[in-house]
Image (cartoon, rainbow, N blue to C red):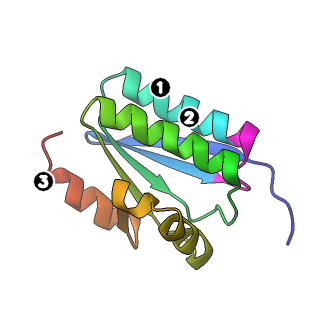
């Protein structure tokens, strides 16, 4: 597998921030993901969609960074949705018990449609 330089892109879609991590999610890249989400949370955005279509691997530190985002959102009664997850990521999140703390959708548009109906 070819290593891809990690990057994070994002955009605002209505009342939801959509985050696009790309590459291997580890300690350094996880910090940039937390910072990117924190920018939106700091602006009062309580709905975050993380589109994992370009993230195949995540290590334990990357998981802990994702947990930080989940905690930050929980503290403001926010919602995190994860989309476009590989089977590996989905299985990993399931094994670690993360699925009970997030909403998972096959594709980004499904998450956005769901979030349109939520007040928080």
Drawn side of residue 30 relative to residue 20, left or right: right
Please state the horizontal and vertical placement of residue 68, each as a whole percent of the image: 50, 36
Q: Nearer the viewer, mark 2 or mark 3?
A: 2
Label 2 vs 1, first from the N-terminus? 2
- Residue at left offset 59%, top offset 39%: 33
Label 2 vs 3, first from the N-terminus? 2
Residue 39, label in figure:
1
Q: Is residue 102 visible?
A: no
Drawn side of residue 104 relative to residue 89, left or right: left
State the residue lying farthest toward the top. 42
Looking at the image, residue 21 lies above or below residue 100? above
State the residue lying farthest toward the bottom. 87
Residue for badge 2: 34
* For the residues bearing labels 3 and 1, Cβ distance under 8 angstroms: no
Q: Is residue 50 visible?
A: yes
**From which residue to which does the magenta span run?**
22-29
- Residue at left offset 22%, top offset 61%: 113
In-front residue for pair 102/95: 95
- Element under label 3? loop
Q: Could you classify mark 3 by the number of other residues whose Cα lies within 10 Å: few (under 14), some (14-19), or many (20 or more)? A: few
Q: Which of marks 2 and 1 is in front?
A: 2
Please state the horizontal and vertical placement of residue 17, each as a whole percent of the image: 38, 41
Residue for badge 3: 117
Please state the horizontal and vertical placement of residue 7, each as a whole percent of the image: 69, 44
- Element under label 1? helix
Quadrant housing the N terminus: bottom right
């Amino acid at each position: 597998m070819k290593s891809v330089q990690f990057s994070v892109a994002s955009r605002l879609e209505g009342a939801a921030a959509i985050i696009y991590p790309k590459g291997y999610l580890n300690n350094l890249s996880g910090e940039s993901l937390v910072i990117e989400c924190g920018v939106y949370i700091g602006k009062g955005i309580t709905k975050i969609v993380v589109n994992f279509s370009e993230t195949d691997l995540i290590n334990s530190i990357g998981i802990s960074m994702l947990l930080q985002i989940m905690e930050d959102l929980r503290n403001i009664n926010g919602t995190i949705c994860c989309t476009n997850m590989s089977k590996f990521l989905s299985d990993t999140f399931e094994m670690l018990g993360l699925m009970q703390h997030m909403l998972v959708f096959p594709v980004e548009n499904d998450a956005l449609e769901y979030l349109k109906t939520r007040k928080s």
